Image: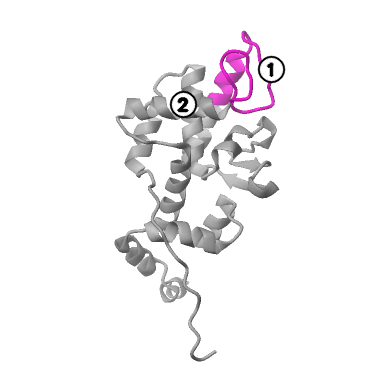
Amino acid sequence: MEGLEPPKIEQRQVNALTYEEVIKLLNSYTTQSFKQLRGKTAIALLADTGVRSNELLNIKLDHIQQDSIFIEKAKGNKQRTVYLSALSTQILSKYLRRRQDYFTDHALIDEEYLFVSSTVGRQLTYAGLYQIIKFAEKKAGLKDVRPHKFRHFYAVQSLSNGLDLFFVQRVLGHKSVSTTAKVYLGSMQEAEVKRNAKLNSPLLKRNKK
């Protein structure tokens, strides 16, 4: 209708990790021990899928497919599927093999969960996940690294790389696309917006056919 303006979506900037920081955190775990591979896998999945910390901790072994993970206990009692890169799939596979070997000689109480403690195999708690991240933070020489910053990293990097806003909304499990836009579009640098606008021009796509 003439004279009406589309509603404005208020945008804010989030404090997301950079790609270089995430690589440093991943590389903080260097050995093939159970605890080291558990830490590396937790960080890889947080950064690669954008899952919330409680969603990560509630992943069960039967939720895992070859290149995806079913998120059963998502926010608002919703369910969704997140997808894994080749790197995360490789890291996860190593952890699963080491996990199986480790618990042949250790108690495993909550065997259905992906992430469990190294002592009696109880489901890993938020405090345990926090310790994993703080260990990596110290080794990487970083400050103020928290679980939710990996979710911010996933969203900002995905949008900066040209991933569709609606796809990012779906993977993150946001109820509305306006939530995704409000939280993350403002964090994209103008140069990134310009580059993506050129790369994803509808005219350019038409001419490529």
Q: Amino acid at mark 1?
A: Ile
Looking at the image, residue 41 sits to the left or right of residue 105; the answer is left
Determine the main secondary structure of the stretch shown in magenta: loop
Above or below, 148 relative to 14: above
Nearer to us in this view, 97 or 168: 168
Q: Secondary structure at mark 1?
A: loop
Q: Quadrant of residue 95?
A: top right
Residue behind mark 2? 132
Q: Is residue 58 left or right of residue 15?
A: right
Image coords of residue 183 (percent x, y): 46, 57
Between marks 2 and 1, how big is the CA–CA gap?
21 Å
Q: Which residues are magenta?
A: 95-124
Numbered mark located on residue 109 in the image: 1
Residue 164 in sight from this viewpoint:
no
Q: Position of residue 73 (x, y in %)?
A: 67, 41
Residue sitting farthest toward the bottom: 2
Q: Who is closer to the viewer here, 5 or 68?
A: 5
Kind of residue sitting beneath label 2 = Ile
Name the one closer to the observer, 196 or 142: 142
Local crowd size for mark 2, using a 10 Å CA cut-off: few (<14), some (14–19), many (≥20): many
Answer whether residue 35 is magenta in the image. Answer: no
Marks 1 and 2: in contact by CB < 8 Å? Answer: no
Location of the N terminus by quadrant is: bottom right
Q: Is 97 included in the stretch rendered in magenta?
A: yes
